[in-house]
Image (cartoon, coloured by chain):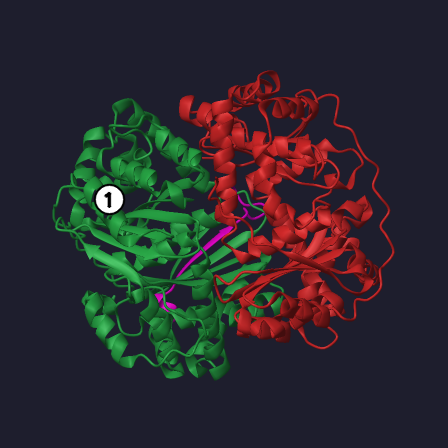
Chain colours: A red, B green
Amino acid sequence: MSSERQALPSRLFVGPGGLRIVVAENHATPITAVAVSCLGGVRNERRELSGITYLAQRMLLKGTQLRSAEDLAEEFEFLGARYAPFTSKDLVGATLSVLSRNLAGALDLLAECILQPAFLPEELDRERRLVLTEIQRRQDDGFACAMDLSEAALYRKHPYRLAVTGTQASVRRLERERLIRWHGRLYSPDRMVVAVVGDLRATHMRDLVLEAFASLDHPRPAWPEPKPEEPPTSPRQRTRRRARQHVALALSFMGPHFPSSDFLAMDVLSQVLAGMSGRLFTELRDRRGLGYAVGAGLEPRRDRSHFGVHLGTSLENRQVALEALLEELRRVRQEPVPRQELARVRRHLLGLFSISLQRKAVQAARLAFFELMGAGHGFLQGYPEAIRRITPEAMLEAARRHLHLEGYACGQVLPHPPSRRSR
Amino acid sequence: MPRRARTNESPSDWLSSARSRCEPYTGQETWSGLSSDVVRRVLPSGLRVLIKEVYPASVVSVAFWIGVGALHETDEEAGVSHFVEHMLFKGSRARPPGALTREIHALGGYVNAFTSFESTCLWCVVPSRHLPAVLDALAETVLNPLFEPAETEREIGVILDEMRMRQDRPEAWCTENLLKLAFPRHPYGRPVIGLEPVLRSMEPSRLRRHHQAHYVAQNIAVVVVGDVQAEPTCQRIQDLLAGLAPGPIRPEPPQPVLPQEGLRRLDLEQDLSSAHLQMLFPLPGLFSPGALACDLVSSVLGDGRSSRLSRRLRERQGLVTRVGCSAFLERGPGFLLLDCTLPPENLDLVEAGIFEELEALRRGGPTPREMQKARNRAQSAFVFNQETVEGIGRTLGHFEMLGDHTLADLYVRQLAGIRGEEVLEACRLYLRRERCSVVRNRPPRVGAAS
């Protein structure tokens, strides 16, 4: 029998326009967490519109039909709330955590931001400038830059190749009217889930959501589906040079879509490789001292999930470290993971899952995510059992199907060669 | 630093004054306090054990806090505390290098460690049923690290790598230089990671001496939080750590902060796209009068989008992508750190804008609403922190190392009682231009030699 933390039972209600509301009672702390999530965003962007979702999302906090940006910030913060809009490749939304006694007020504010943003021209200009600076700043972060480069190289056409923030050129061109139209289409009740986890009665939490989102009562037009894309047939590489001490390198692979049994197998496999007791760290850093930072991770996506590996090393060790890293990936394609190792990794994965569920914000975000992506909100409770069922053979097959060593992309930020390095 | 002498006030003095000033708490209905049901034992050896039973948790956090950090080091040994912390993972009498991490991961948990100016902490979180195994593993690790020459040699390379990677992180590099500028010849002025020449010549014997001197019973607190039973857990800890030398606490060497005559400034250049501007104002230590008012100063200035600096520089003027403010308040001297990321061409404008905002706050003080907002935010943050066993454990351990774990609750309660005039007084005393240190880290100017 397992004593791992089980996610608390959640209930699904369907509101007007198909809005799904998932609620779970959790009385551990006087906190309530809300996750509003909606399918759509970067996955529906074209190159010339790259960054439109992100900028539209940023404008949610920049004033509504009723309140200025300053008043919004003041009111949220006076309530001691934690709140933020988010944009990912597949989803948009916003999260809120607040002392439960302040939930009603904070939830109304959040809904107002999502449903009635004002897109004031002067606020838009300012926010656009800030986004442009952020895009620039991301170039200063070696790993972030390497990851962007590798993902941009992995796809030829699919919108997953586009950076969430957009590019300097595309963001400069986004017009206000366009942003307003885009936002008007983003939040559609039939593609949307609001998950609430708190120490209040489930029906009360549901009613608060229904009230806050009452005006969202009819679906918006569907997005066109992006064309599926196959993995590259040979490795692709993109390089940038900066005056740096270290090499930051990222590899991107097209993984299985979420939810699928291959996804779960790859999830376990990425844990075999990742972390301080994973194969990459043990082999590259502990045993061979080839780099300070090394890791791997699988990001669930609707089309092909993203399997990424990163490495921080010196220029001298770059080639050897990269070969050692690829060798570890080759190994998981060639040999099944020994059962003992699998048992250890599985315990680690499920333990981390239990630990993360202590936070209501994590519970709410996962309930909304699982429900939206087609796994169902109940998957939060079913996840441990699904992971326990994964066998070494299933992992081997998933690795062979998705970890194409001849078809990945590499992004890297390299220091200038020694002769040019400034002292 | 004129306030330095007052930091010698003991935690208990501060506590009694805090208690007498404390107003009734009027926060969340379900407030129960963090320290209310903590079982605290001082074992005959002097080892402190703190256990808080939390239900239903299903996970447990265990932390070993050792009262040694960069403040206890001289220039010649800079980095030794952090190095010993790394070596805890590099083999003990019963565990080969790396085994501790593998063992804890295999139990479904994670383990990590950190070194600060004041403490070293080894901590982990695991599913509760593995508590006995984790206590065994951590106790053995803390008692018996090996410091083998080959592992020490390899770790020198790893730490130097870590050091170089910090230089590639522009904000961290900026802060490191700011502390150096603001606290010359004081341990705050040296990075906790240490100084390269000291690290390069690190010997196992040096590490062993440090371990023997500081990893002693009176200098260690073990903090356990989760669905555990206090009494048997305490007994288990006592048995496991019976071999710990009783040893006295070695006090920090005296480290006066040099007086500051005027504003200090340093300009850095790195291959960057954005610039970073950081400013530091020295503050009194946590146990000085006025320290908590400084926490509210920091909140009013830089906590959240509606704080003064963010509203002006980010929301209204769009001059910075990020601005934040934090008050570092510990047993030793404190400081207020302002931190902005911005396009390089805005550096002058932003610096001037910050000084204007500080001046406005020094003149008029915070509004009653700002005060209430700062209190609300502090109280909410405190409750959020209690969502996880590791959050509770970290807060309890932090305050225990400062002298008393119940300070955790008093800190928040006392914040609720601070008046606007006290915040105004703190601004006038500490936010003075001539006590400020400024570091700007920017891309090289076009045409300038690199």
| Kind of residue indicated by mark 1 | Arg
In the image, residue B98 above or below residue A110: above
For this rendering, which residue is in front, A404 or B42?
B42
Circle 1 packing at 10 Å, graded few (<14), some (14-19), many (20+), is some
Which part of the image, by quadrant, shows the C terminus of chain A? top left
Image position, residue B42 (x, y; %): 18, 55
Rendered location of residue A298, percent (x, y): 61, 36
Task: Tell me the magenta residue range.
Answer: B430-450
Is residue B216 in view from this perspective?
yes
Q: Is residue B440 magenta?
A: yes
Identify the residue at the far top of this view: A334
To which quarter of the image does residue B402 belong? bottom left
Q: Position of residue B419 (x, y in %)?
A: 38, 82
> Is disc 1 placed on a helix, strand or loop?
helix
What residue do we see at 37% from left, 48% from top? B61
Between B235 and A311, the residue placed more toward the observer is B235
Q: Which residue in the structure is indicated by mark 1? A: B236
